[in-house]
Structure formats: structure tokens, C-alpha cells
Amino acid sequence: MDLESYKKTWENQPEETKSVSKIDIYKMAHSKSSSVVKWIFIIGLLELIFWSGLNLLVPDSYIKVYTDFNLVDFLNYYFILHYIVIALFLVLFYKNYASVSVVDNTKRLMNKILRVRKTVKYYVYYNLGGFVLVTIIVNSVMFSNPEILTETMNPQHLNVDMNAILTVTLVAQIIVLLVMLLLLWLFYKVTYGTLLKKLNKNYKELDSLDDLN
Amino acid sequence: MQKDLESKFLVDFEKNQNIVHKVCRIYTTNQDAHNDLFQEVTIQLWKNYSKFRGEAKFSTWMYRVALNTAISLYRKSTRTIKTLDISDVSYKVQSLEYDDTEEQQLKSLYKAIQGLSDIEKALIFLYLENKPYKEIAEALGITQVNARVKMNRAKDKLRNILNP
């Protein structure tokens, strides 16, 4: 049987018998959405808050280390710049989110949803990059002043192998960074992976059509 | 003003709700998921109704919002049954009273459509609903040429499922 005859069958199918009443439509229209866009917005917002809040958690003891190494000014300038960038990301994130419209054509709609997600992704890259950069700068300043470093880390002048301690400090920092990256990667796989799997697949299918010509 | 808009929306929606039901039947495989998707489409329609200026027909606008919600916004319910046999589809037509062979055909058609991808489903649905290529291409955001190419592939795939 050819598709045209199935099309006739389709056209002849009767109206849904379990039709929804006006009251039920009203109730449904005013209920809470659980759309992908809404979840991406919520998770994205939490991420923006989480990463900008992380910087406030620097313990007081670090301040002394930074003072000893004359790093306070550098870090203050860095944080001013950092918060300007965060503000820009917030604006961009909201603008991208607000531009998502279900009335758009399918391809543009998916593109815009993915753009909201990408804003957050770049924000996280920026934070990780900034974190690594600052860590490298702070470490190089500290390690290029071994006298101050020894003084700060061993103020009582105990008889310990300073080289060993410094190596351990460096290795510990690298391990913490790697563990953090692994946890982040897992977090993204689980949250965005499940949320966007279908959307990514559908978008690729539409987008690949352009390669045909 | 809001009340007027609301009552107009309810009238428009109730009259055209069959479009949404059909989209839900195509994109879901059980009654719970059907209701879930129906609700999400309703929310999206109402959320955007104030921006609907009547340039297009309400039904045309409804097709777009319903398909977009199914393809892009709706997260498949965890209750969704992965594999499907004919009895799972029967809920879709069980309450429809009409010719037996037509009923069988409609069941096979719905079942076959489940074997298509989300995008292919949209194309086939718009083809079955007699929409011109111009409208199909515009709705999906692809060129008419690409819409034709993709449609032909989707039809071939559907034919193969229907007549193995």
C-alpha cells in the first residue's frame, strides 16, 4: 500500500474523543512548565552564583601569605576585573535566555537554547582559566622568593626538609585541580548530558542538511 | 483585557486542540506522556498567546508551537516505554469508532511513525496534514530544497517500516 492511501486514512481519523474542556485547558495553561529551557536557566543561574561565590571563600590565613609576597594589589585588581567579567556574563546569559522563543522556527529555537548553554560553558571555562592562571602567577612569585616562602611556611624555623614540603605543596595543588576538573566533567555529563541529549541530536540532524548542497 | 485574551485563547484552543492531540500521539508512546506533553504545549501556547497577532492562522501558529515543544522543549518522560508493540499504540485509537480496516491502517501508521526520528516525525506529520513545502521549510528553519530531500528520505523510511 502506498503512502497516499495512508494519508487518506490519516485525514479520515476522527477527532479525539477525550477532548479537553476549557476549564482543564485553563488549569493546564497556568501550571508550571518543566521545559528544558527552564532547567537550563535554573542550572545556569546556580552555576553563575556558585562560581562567583567561590572566590569569597578564600580563608584569612591566605591573606597573610599574599601580603608577605606583595600580591594583595595584584589580586585586588584581578578581582575587580573578574567581577566586571561576571557581570557581563550575567547580562549575556539573560539576553540569550530571553531571546529563546518557541514561536521561532525549529532550527533557530534549538540554536538559541544551545547558545544559553554555551554562555554558561564559556563562563566556566573563563573561571577555570582564571583560576589556573592566578594559581600559576601566585606560585611562580612564591617559588621565585624561596626565603620569604620558607619564612612564611616555617615561621618557627623547625628543622624540616623545606624542599620536600614545597614539592608536596606543588603536587597537592595539581592533584586538587585534577580532581576538581574530573568532578566538574562528571557533573556536566550528568546534568547537561541528560538535559540536552535529545536537543543536540535533533539539532545535528537539521544542521547536517546544509552539508548536502 | 487579560480576561478577554484568556477567553479568546480558550475558545481558539478548544476548537483546534485536535492538532495538539495528534502531535502528542506521534511524539509519545503512552497516555501519561501524552498528557505531559499536552500540558507543556498548553503552557507554551498560553505564554506566547499575547504575542500572537493573528498574522497567521491560529492553527498554523499552533502547529509550530506544538512541534517545537515536542522536538526542543519537552524532556522525554522517564515513564516512556522504549520498545513498542501494537498493543501500546491501541490506546491512541481505541476510543475511535469507525471502519475496522481503516482502524488497523491508522494503528500501523502510528506504529510505523514511532520508528522515525523527531525531525522525520515532524516532516511526515506536516505531509500528512497536507502542508505545502514552503510552510514545512519555514517551520523547521531549513531551505525548501533540503525539506524535499529530507522528506523523501523520511517517506522511504516510513514505507520500509510499513511494507518490510
Image: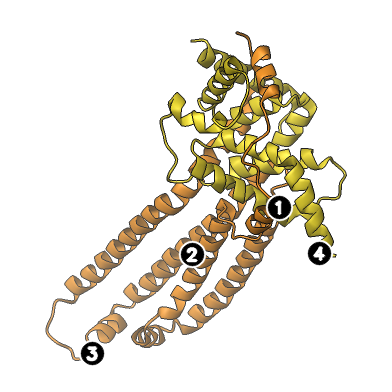
Three-letter code, disc 1: Lys
- Give the spatial CA distance, label 2 vs label 3: 33 Å
Q: Is residue B70 above or below residue B129?
A: below
Question: From the viewer's perspective, is the residue at label 2 or at label 4 nearer?
Answer: 4
Res. B2 mark = 4
Chain given the colour yellow: B
Residue under label 1: A22
Which residue is the extreme one toward the bottom? A156
- Which subunit holds the residue at mark 1? A
Question: From the viewer's perspective, is the residue at label 4 or at label 3 nearer?
Answer: 4
- Give the spatial CA distance, label 1 vs label 4: 16 Å
Res. A127 mark = 2
- Which subunit holds the residue at mark 2? A
Three-letter code, disc 2: Asn
Q: Quadrant of the N terminus of chain A?
A: top right
Q: Are marks 1 and 2 on the same chain?
A: yes
Mark 1 nearby-residue class (10 Å; few <14, some 14–19, many ≥20): some
Q: Is residue A115 left or right of residue A185?
A: right
Q: Quadrant of the C terminus of chain A?
A: top right
Question: From the viewer's perspective, is the residue at label 1 or at label 2 nearer?
Answer: 1
Callout 1 touching callout 2 (CB < 8 Å): no
Q: Secondary structure at mark 3?
A: loop
- Give the spatial CA distance, label 4 vs label 3: 72 Å
The structure residue drawn at horizontal position 81% and vertical position 63%, both measured from the top left corner, is: B3
Q: Is residue B146 visible?
A: no
The structure residue drawn at horizontal position 68% and vertical position 50%, both measured from the top left corner, is: A21
- Which subunit holds the residue at mark 3? A
The structure residue drawn at horizontal position 74% and vertical position 54%, both measured from the top left corner, is: B48
Quarter holding residue B140 = top right
Q: Secondary structure at mark 2?
A: helix
- Which subunit holds the residue at mark 4? B
